[in-house]
Image (cartoon, rainbow, N blue to C red):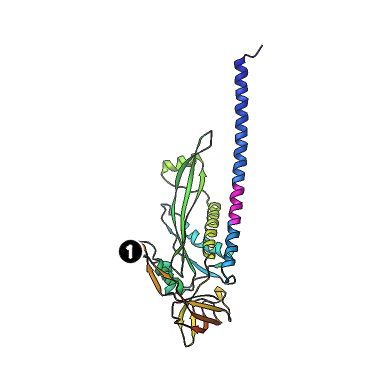
């Protein structure tokens, strides 16, 4: 039986369509793979460039920037598991294990530590960055990390270029902030999210019971902590190391930084005025580093403090900041 022209045309069209479809799928696969490779390469180059830029800018590679992680309140409706605690614990672990120039030391239980944990706030409810920096200076900190678990909830999305498919996900939203103690400025303010797909039946069950039943999120939380930790690490490493004069003596000063920061006897430091304060929006205040006031030389070091003799003095005072000469 002879095939009619219409049948031949239909089959030819189908073959062309299938060929184009396969080509598109192959192109999409290659494109996705290429994009992942480009993203990974870009990230690596960015990290390497940033590290090189730090090494060129600063002469304090052997000193550790001390940081504290505090806050991380849980603003989500999901309370049966303390996810905020996972971030309070996980970020210090990441920084201590993966970040070369940043250390999160064990904090004691003194008055300054308690004030830090309470996270001072303005009347508006926002973090009082000036008060936070003042507390951090007394503790010999270079940076203070805080954040918020904003939400854990359902979302639905459509996937697929040709064959649309509705997928249901649980989304985790977290924001993180890092404050520099020399100036009180925010050196990082970033939001992160992760999505975990759930089965349709599980979604229907949770919707019918109006109850969020989370799957195992261990791997998701680890990935999220890694991404957040890396961002925090870069933000802190990109700042020069600073110390602060805690008190003045007769021809000497006491610094609120010591062995934990990597200071050693013989280290020479420049002292800068840090008494000028400017006001920003919403009642926020910031420290401004001013002119050089002199130089000091470290002579004795303890874990959290050190003593330095004054080499030159043009008005050194308590609260002044110091940097590697």
Please, which residue is most extreme toward the bottom here?
A: 250
Magenta residues, dominant SS class: helix
Q: Which residues are magenta?
A: 36-45
- The answer to which image quadrant residue 43 occupies is bottom right
Q: Which residue is mark 1?
A: 123
**Picture layout, residue 275 above or below residue 226:** below
Is 137 on the left or on the right of 60, as rendered? left
At label 1, counting other C-alpha atoms closer than 10 Å, the crowd grade (few under 14, some 14-19, many 20 or more) is few
- The answer to which image quadrant residue 136 occupies is bottom left
Place of residue 7 in the rendered image (x, y in percent of width and height, measured from the top left): 61, 17
Please, which residue is most extreme toward the right here?
A: 1
**Picture layout, residue 35 above or below residue 236:** above
Residue positioned 43% across, 79% down in the render: 318
Place of residue 111 in the rendered image (x, y in percent of width and height, measured from the top left): 42, 74
Nearest the viewer among 20 and 122 is 20
Figure quadrant of the C terminus:
bottom right
Circle 1 — which element?
loop
Please, which residue is most extreme toward the top here?
A: 1
Is 310 on the left or on the right of 280, as rendered? right
Note whether residue 98 is visible: no
Note whether residue 92 is visible: yes
Residue positioned 62% across, 41% down in the render: 30
Figure quadrant of the N terminus:
top right
């Amino acid at each position: 039986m002879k095939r009619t022209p219409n049948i031949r045309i239909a089959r030819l069209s189908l073959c062309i369509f299938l060929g184009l479809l396969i080509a598109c799928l192959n192109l999409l696969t290659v494109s996705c793979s290429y994009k992942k490779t480009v993203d990974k390469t870009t990230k690596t180059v960015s990290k390497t460039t940033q590290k090189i830029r730090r090494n060129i800018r600063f002469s304090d590679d052997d000193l550790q920037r001390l940081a504290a992680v505090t806050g991380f309140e849980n603003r989500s409706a999901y309370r049966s598991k303390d996810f905020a605690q996972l971030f309070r614990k996980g970020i210090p672990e990441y920084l201590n294990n993966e970040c070369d120039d940043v250390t999160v030391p064990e904090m004691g239980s003194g008055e300054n530590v308690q004030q830090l944990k309470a996270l001072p706030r303005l009347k508006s409810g926002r973090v009082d960055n000036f008060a936070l920096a003042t507390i951090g200076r007394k503790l010999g900190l270079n940076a203070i990390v805080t954040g918020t678990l904003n939400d854990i909830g359902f979302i639905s999305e459509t996937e697929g270029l040709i064959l649309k498919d509705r997928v249901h996900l649980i989304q985790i939203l977290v924001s993180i902030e890092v404050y520099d103690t020399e100036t009180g400025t925010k050196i990082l303010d970033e939001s992160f999210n992760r999505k975990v797909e759930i089965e349709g039946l599980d979604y229907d069950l949770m919707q019918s019971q109006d109850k969020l039943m989370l799957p195992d999120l261990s791997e998701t939380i680890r990935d999220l902590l890694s991404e957040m930790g890396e961002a925090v690490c870069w933000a802190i490493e990109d700042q020069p190391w600073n110390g602060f004069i805690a008190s003045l003596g007769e021809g000497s000063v006491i610094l609120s930084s010591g062995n934990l920061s990597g200071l050693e006897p013989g280290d020479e430091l420049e002292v800068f005025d840090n008494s000028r304060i400017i006001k920003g929006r919403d009642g926020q205040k910031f420290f401004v580093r001013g002119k050089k006031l002199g130089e000091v030389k470290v002579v004795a070091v303890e874990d959290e403090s050190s003593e330095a003799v004054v080499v030159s003095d043009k008005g050194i005072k308590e609260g002044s900041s110091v940097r590697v000469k």
